[in-house]
Structures are given as C-alpha cells and as structure tokens.
Image: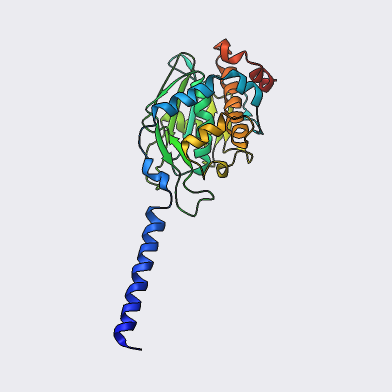
Amino acid sequence: MNKKVVYGIIVVIVIIAAAVLVFNSSSSSPLAVYDGKPVNQSQIVALESIAANTGLANKIGAGVDSPYPTATSGYNVTMVNGKPTVIYIGAEYCPFCAVFRWGAIIALMRFGNLSSLHYMTSSSDNKEPFTSVPTFTFYNSTYSSRYITFLPVEVENNTYGTLQQPSQLQAAAAARFDSGGSIPFIDFGNQSIQIGIPQSISPGYIKSLNWGQIIDQIGNSNTTISQAVLGEADVFTAEICKIDNFTPASVCSQPYVRAIVG
C-alpha cells in the first residue's frame, strides 16, 4: 500500500479517536451546561406548589420510602438560633445525594423559603453507579424559616474538588452518627438520622430526564418518581414535625404526617 495512503489512514484514525475522547470527557450529558446556573423561577414555583399540595401528599404518604430514618436516643434536640436544627452533609458529585435533594427540598419548602438554588448534575465519571443525575446544589443557597434552622454543606463539587468544609457542629454530628463518612447524611435535630438513601429511591429513576420532566412526574401520583421522591419528602416532613413541636399545624396535622409518625 502507498505510504501516503497509510499515513492518511493513521491521521484519520487519530482524529476520530481524539474526537471520541473529547466527547466522552466533556459532553457526557447535555444537562451539564446548566451546572451552577440559577434555577428558573417557574420551576421553583412548581416545586413550591407540589410542596403545598396536601391532597397529593396525603395520597402518596410514605410512598416507597422504606426504611424510615433511624431514631437516636439520649440526645437533646440540637438548637441553633433558638430553633431545632436539620444538618445535611453531601457532595455535588454524589448520585445518591442528587436524588435525595429532590425530596429534601420539597420537605424544606413546607417549613420555610429556599432561595438561590442552582442547577447541578452529579459526576459524569463512569466509576459512579449512576452518572449525570439532574439535581440541585445547596452550595450558596439560603434558607429561612420560623420553625427550623437548616445547615447544609456540600463537601466536594461534581468533579471531586473540595467545595466546602463542615462546620464544627456538622462535623460533630457526622463523628457521632456517621463514622464511616457515608453521604448523603442528614441529622434531624439529633433525634433521628438518615445515612444514604433507601434502595427504593434510585437515582436511575431520574437520570434520563431533565428538571422540568422530573417536576411533572413528581406532581403525578401515578408515577414511580412521585412515589419515591414525594414519599421521601413526606417522611422528612414528619421527622421535622417531630422536632419542632408539630408546627405549623397546616403541615404537621396532615393525615400523612400522623400516619408516618405512628
């Protein structure tokens, strides 16, 4: 074969291989372009509407969220600024944190206002069991509530770089209940904890959808996503009610809360 032809074939192969490598490393998910961008206000309103929909919450109840967070014993309720405190430790790369945040955000919206939420996708690295899961990040977000104090920390970004350091209070909670360092970790006022997520709430349910599609699915009680995400939100709501003296009554007197509390 002519040497020029051979060299030409080699060049073409190298170019194609390079193009494939670039695509796999930087374009694994079209949703990644939204990472770090503020959440569209219409989607915030849609999530708040779902959070406030007591009929939907009562229809779903605990959904498929089992087992419940684990009760602790021998500890006083953690108080910050005179309010019972919920601590979250997670990371942006984590696909399980990604699906966890959906339910946590809906529950938190029932007790206060979340602002400055930003879009995020979990890591695109194939070493993760689920890649590029659409979610949000608590990094740089703010939360205000008459009833609880919410203290979140995202320890790494979605490329495994250090993002935030846990506060002394957050680190103490993790040392007390989560010596293995698993995430997501949530501490409901030292009265109950959840480490990781139940197998019934899989990141696989939402990884192939965008944010708008996921919100639509959560609002439809007949979907698996609604049963998983809203069921999780309802359980988290009940856990918060237990530490804040069941206030506000408009949330904590709902039948689904009473059924979950038992």
Q: Does the image show residue 74?
A: no
Look at 36% across and 89% down and name the residue there. 1
The picture places residue 223, in percent across and down from the top left corner, at 62, 35
Q: Residue furthest top?
A: 249
Look at 41% across and 57% down and name the residue there. 24
| Residue 212 in the figure: left or right of residue 61 | left
- Which colouring convention does the figure follow? rainbow
Q: Nearer the viewer, residue 23 or 123?
A: 23
Position of residue 67 relative to residue 52, above or below, is below
| Residue 55 in the figure: left or right of residue 262 | left
Q: Nearer the viewer, residue 71 or 262?
A: 262
Q: Quadrant of residue 18?
A: bottom left
Look at 58% across and 10% down and name the residue there. 249
Q: Nearer the viewer, residue 20 or 114?
A: 20
Q: Residue furthest left?
A: 4
Quarter of the picture containing the C terminus is top right
The picture places residue 126, in percent across and down from the top left corner, at 48, 55
The picture places residue 245, in percent across and down from the top left corner, at 57, 12
The picture places residue 145, in percent across and down from the top left corner, at 45, 16
Count of labels in the image: 0
Q: Quadrant of residue 60?
A: top right
Q: Does the image show residue 187?
A: yes
Position of residue 216 relative to residue 158, above or below, is above
